[in-house]
Image: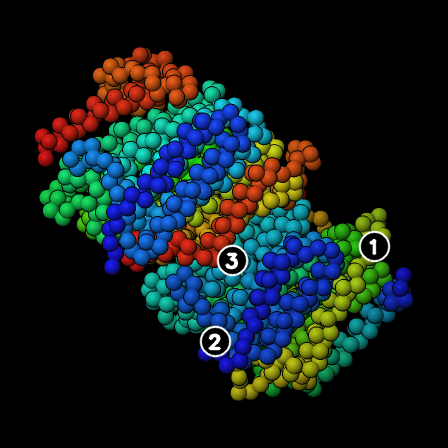
Amino acid sequence: MSSLGVLFERLRDQHKLWRNVFFVVLVALLGLNLVVLPEESHFGWDGYPGFFAGFGLVVGAVVVLIVEKIVRPLIARKEDFYGDI
Amino acid sequence: MATSSFIHPSVGFLVLAVILPFLPGRQWKWLLLVPPVIALFSVFSVDPGLYAVLPYLGEQVTLGRVDSLSLIFAQVFAVMSLIGMVYALNVEDKGQHIAACLYVAGSFGSIFAGDYVSLFVFWEVMSIGSTFLVFLNRSRESTLAGFRYFLFHTLGGLFLLGGVLLRYQATGSFAFDHVMPADAALYDWLILIGFCVNAAVVPLHAWLPDAYPRATVAGAVFMCAFTTKTAVYVLARGFAGWEVLATAGAVMAVYGVAQAIIANSARRVLAYDIISQVGYMAVGIGVGSAMTLDGTSAHAYAHILYKSLLFMSVGGVITALGTDRLDKLGGLAGRMPWVTIFFTVGSLSISGMPLFNGFVTKTMTIAGAAEAQFTWQALALEVATVGTFIAVGVRLPYFLFWRDAPVGGVANAPLRPLAWNMYAGMAMAAVLCIAQGVYPDMLYRYLPFPVDEPFEPWTAWHVLQALLMLGFAGLAVFLLKGVMSVREGVNLDFDYFYRLVGRGLLALVCRPVAWIDDLWTEAYRVIGLKVLVLLGAGSSWFDRKAIDGVVDGSAAAVLGVGRLGAKAQNGNLQDYLAMAAVLALIVFGLVWYLG
Amino acid sequence: MSATIESARLLLPLAVTGVAPFAIWLARHNENNREAVSFIAAGLTFIAMLTFVPGVLAGHVYHYTLFTILPGITVSFGLDGLGIIFGLIAPFLWGFATSYNIGYMRSLNEHAQTRYYFCFAIAIFGAVGVALAANVFTLYLFYEVITVFTYPLVAHHQDAEGFSGARKYLVYLMGTSKLFLLPAMVLTYVLCGTLEMNLGTVVSGMFPAEVVSNHPNLVRLTYVLFICGLAKAALMPFHNWLPSAMVAPTPVSALLHAVAVVKAGVFSMSRIILSGFGVETMNSLGLGLPTAYLAAFTIVVASLIALTKDDIKARLAYSTVSQLSYVIIGVSLLTPMAVQGGILHIANHAFAKITLFFAAGAIYVATHQKKISLMNGLGRKMPWTFGAFGLASLSMIGMPPVCGFVSKWYLVNGALQAGQVVLLVALLASTALNAGYFVPIFYRAFFKAPVIEVDHYKEAPLTMVVPLCFTAAMSVVLGFYPQLFQDFIRVFGNY
């Protein structure tokens, strides 16, 4: 395995560390959001701090839940459903 | 009318397609790079104007309409054709290269077409070329998918042709220009439908996730760039400001990511994401302001670069392991580090992460849509951005590279090495993605429509907004990681209905009609018999066998239904001549009597 | 500017094709001499027709009366823009068909080859005669010659299937010509006092204006009788002889379905509609549109049936039925673009269809396969054959840049010129249907895994493969240079 590959493997092994870094960054971003705000708001609420954070979290969760829990059970079929393979 | 000269980029590709079968040896591969270089030179050196106005089929067709809109698309096509050819250098199958050349030639031709006739011709050439890129994968799946692809695109082309002809009948002209929404006639809608097939507008989109995952590795790289973006160009040219497109685009954007999040094949995830991204472009065209049209053009440019990068990386995985099924893969970060890096660049670009070109392009369209009061469409695009990040930015790389490989699966098999040119192609695209992200002006200076307040992507707020939204979407995925899964199988799409229509036509129309024909084909015996029996009364006088001697064996078959009837039905020539004479006399008599 | 030129030179092509059969019979003991006669005759006939090209392009009409049977009934020949198209194609393709015949008949060691070449030559004689016919009687005479002398070709195998198919062939063609065409000719004579058609212009035919206004229904009846009588044009419901004639050896099918029989049919119909009745009469009696709708019906229904056929020749036969009606729909729509498209299709279809049948025969000679579902993977063993098949299919579908696109373009524009959107839709639907039944043959051959053992197969003999590649190449050439035939049509119709 190349040295770059070894590096990536080590990064993979450290995933708990990376997870913590991720959380720290998220908190920092939220903090920045109190200070840095848009010039004009497009949707009305996007002027408020935390809007896009909430948007990303909620929309992300809702999309994943709807798609995995509702949509997928309805339309999932076997690999060779149409007999093409 | 041309002051400077214009080398039409298609020419190089067409010439190469024609001569390639006849080139011997192994060195012909380097010729593959020549047409893209010519195309690049041509695109950067030509002045706007109308070139190559030629007579064809009784009309004057314009093959070279060069202006800022066609030039920006042509520019990215030229860049992409070079990247694609570099990536495909290791492919030995000449057929794939010929198909790719025809395909790219068709795309360039469509971009520069100034009238509907040449557009239609190049549109069909594109369709043929891309069909072969699917066929040449040579698996049973691919063959059938290629056929469905061709049929569907032929149908789309027929809508286009029908609209073009009706338009010609009504207006007397084949000129391809912008249509005001207020002036829309039936034929404009037909042309729009034809364009929407290639743009993969829902519900005419199912050909894309059906065919793209089944194309050849290099073929899919070409296909992801050209068909849909040519459609985006023609929509921008002809239908800017048509609000229905904004709505359609919003639907496409959300539908695409929804399917992408649950697809099991990596190329199918990317294919659905194409639909989503083209949705952004459709919204931009539908809004129709200078800023959103610029946003569409910029997004198309960036999308070609990062989508091809993604397809190239996944193509690398397929080359190495033979599959792109997410349920079978994992842990490739260590084993294929460079592919991982290139893929990451692509996925961060597509998600709109700052420092990459997606960030400087997507936001333009959304901002423009919101400013033009298309609020819910803009909101839908923001939702799609979250979805894209989840599907392509998180899920796909996790299951391909970062998670542990499933035990005993194909992911642990020895890797087939990738050719150097594949890495080169990926590197070229990756470099451009980053360069445009860091220095957006290199893209912005080619945007077709001047705006009063140029869009500034690199503001503190824009960066923060992107990071916030993407970051917290990532958090959502983290919290729900038990819910997201990959398992074997496919998800139904609208092609279920297309196939239903096809099978229905065969069963409900074709077979009954053939059955009726089979009955009717025997009717000659019954009808012919009855009629000729009545008229054959006097035919027994003419029984010469002279003709029989020359015409071997003519008397062998005789129906056993009575001598007179047999005479009528035995196909004996002399009998027919005799009956003819009798008939002629009867008719002559009638006419004399009546006339 | 245009003149009628009396020229005995018109007899030259007829003389060559008339003498050739006897020369073939005389040379019957030496195969190669015998085949050489066919080649030489094809070449001479073609050259003879070529000598008329400059005159025809200048707008002249050639004419020659051979002899008179009764007052007003003569055997006369004439040549104008329409006739020269058929007159050039028939001998040109005869040359290729002869090469192909050699490969086919000798590879399969067929019996009665002299009779075969003899009848082939006479069939071409009949085709040339139809092309050069200046009046209805001559047309009828040579039309029947074709029928009589293709009968032994259809029945060639002399087995039960062969005789049954040939019998049906004869019943259909002779039956319709005796029941309908002959009375039509008689009626025409009675109404017009002459059988001479009006060559060189499409506007007025042979029916004087007073006749049309005084006896409109009789003229209409005459027209209907003509249409029913020309069953060689395979207009529904008189089309069934065509698929049944597939029992013939494939070169015969190629000849029948591309060169002699069906082209004589649609040519005769075009001749009757344009030179017999003329645009003015057709319009004043409202005869064009019903014919066009019947043709549209044939186009669509024949394609629908073709989708269900697994035998390659059956599928090609129904495709022919469909494509012939392209010519009829064009000619009967009567608008300038439609007529140009229809007549151009006579040429375009000939080249593409002969390629397809040549390919089908080559496949049979090389593999003895007739069923499409068994042809998987053959393309890799017979790339030239299937490649040519693919090109010719593109022409049938009407894709640029092959010739079929050009005639389709003119036809759809012509349908719009006449304001007929339904016919436009029928033509467009036909495109999709053609794709539906031609593309599978192509992709099966090249991209599907074989279902039977194919490794030992290879291309058919060169005498078969070269002609079919050449005719396929001609399809592409005609797509880029449709002017080759378009100029004749422009002169003919004064467009």
The image quadrant that residue B382 belongs to is bottom right
Which one is in front in this view, the residue at disc 2 or the one at disc 3? 2
Please state which of residues B526 and B515 is positioned toward the viewer in this rendering: B526
Mark 1 to mark 2 CA distance (whole Å)? 51 Å
**Residue at screen point 53% across, 80% down:** B4
Amino acid type at circle 3 is: Glu
Amino acid type at circle 1 is: Leu
Chain under numbered label 1: B
**Which residue is tagged 3?**
B124
Comes first in the chain, label 3 or label 1: 3
Q: Secondary structure at mark 3?
A: helix
Label of residue B487 in the image: none
Q: Are marks 2 and 3 on the same chain?
A: yes
Label of residue B50 in the image: 2
Label 2 close to label 3 by CB (< 8 Å): no
The image quadrant that residue B386 belongs to is bottom right
Q: Where is residue C53 shown, x and y percent of the image?
A: 36, 52
Chain under numbered label 3: B
Comes first in the chain, label 1 or label 2: 2
Chain under numbered label 2: B
